[in-house]
């Protein structure tokens, strides 16, 4: 889906930008991060490559109901969020990935979750969000919980032909929690080049 806005803000002393990514944002670093995260990112194929990920991003941008966003810290892409079912009906689903393990525990995951829900609620009127995760993915659970999500249901789900214990979490946009230390939050139009 073509998204026409992005968010710029400060978190502590760092400048952040959150918005849709394009093929030009897909780098070898991005692909390596995907390859290293196969345990919880369920839709990654074993033969992922730079060209295939660029084609995937292009396909998502052309979609009528899905989007892919990036979080840039001081101009560097540190993670992405994938969003499905933007136009509904029902919940808009969000999944996030912080690329580097040494970049974790800095609040980037919470920032990705918050920014995804905030941008879509403020610009497109999305009001209900969901996220699914394996119960063993404690970091993801805590990230979504910190942003205001609650457990909608839990159970066993078929994930790529393997039964897994999972949580399905939900959020009403009005319950979205802003991560700590954010300031100067502004939604701005994307200038076409």
Image: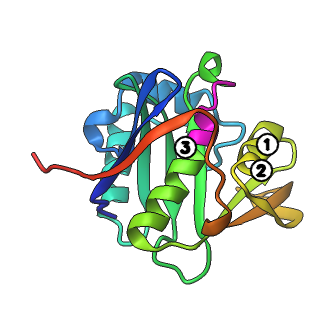
Q: Does residue 152 sit above or below 159 in this rendering?
A: below
Q: Is residue 137 left or right of residue 52?
A: right
Q: Nearer the viewer, residue 2 or 106?
A: 106
- Inspect this view and state whether residue 90 appears: yes
Q: Does residue 34 sit above or below 58 in this rendering?
A: above
> Which of the labelled discs sits on residue 145, or is there none?
2
Considering the numbered disc 2 on the image, is that residue within a helix, a strand or a loop?
helix
> Which of the labelled discs sits on residue 63, or is there none?
none
Q: Is residue 165 magenta?
A: no
In the rendered image, the quadrant that contains the C terminus is: top left
Q: Is residue 157 left or right of residue 55?
A: right
Q: Mark 3 highlights which residue?
A: 112
In contact (CB < 8 Å): disc 2 and disc 1: yes
Q: Toward which corner of the image does residue 180 lie, by quadrant? A: top right
Extreme top residue here? 102
Q: Which residues are magenta?
A: 105-111
In the rendered image, the quadrant that contains the N terminus is: bottom left
Residue 86: x and y, percent? 48, 70
């Amino acid at each position: 889906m073509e998204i026409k806005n992005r968010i710029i803000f400060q978190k502590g002393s760092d400048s952040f930008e959150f918005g849709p990514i394009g093929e030009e944002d897909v780098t070898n670093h991005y692909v390596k991060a995907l390859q290293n995260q196969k345990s919880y990112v369920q839709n990654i194929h074993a033969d992922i490559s730079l060209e295939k990920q660029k084609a995937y991003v292009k396909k998502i941008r052309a979609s009528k109901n899905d989007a892919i966003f990036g979080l840039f810290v001081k101009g560097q892409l540190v993670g992405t969020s994938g969003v499905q079912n933007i136009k509904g009906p029902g919940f808009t689903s969000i999944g996030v990935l912080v690329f580097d393990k040494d970049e974790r525990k800095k609040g980037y995951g919470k920032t990705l979750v918050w920014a995804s829900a905030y941008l879509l609620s403020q610009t497109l009127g999305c009001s209900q969000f969901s996220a699914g995760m394996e119960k063993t993915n404690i970091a993801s659970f805590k990230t979504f919980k910190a942003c205001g999500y609650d457990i909608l249901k839990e159970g066993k789900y078929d994930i790529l032909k393997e039964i897994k214990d999972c949580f399905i979490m939900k959020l009403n946009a009005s319950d979205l929690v802003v991560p700590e230390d954010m300031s100067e939050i502004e939604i701005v139009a994307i200038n076409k080049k």
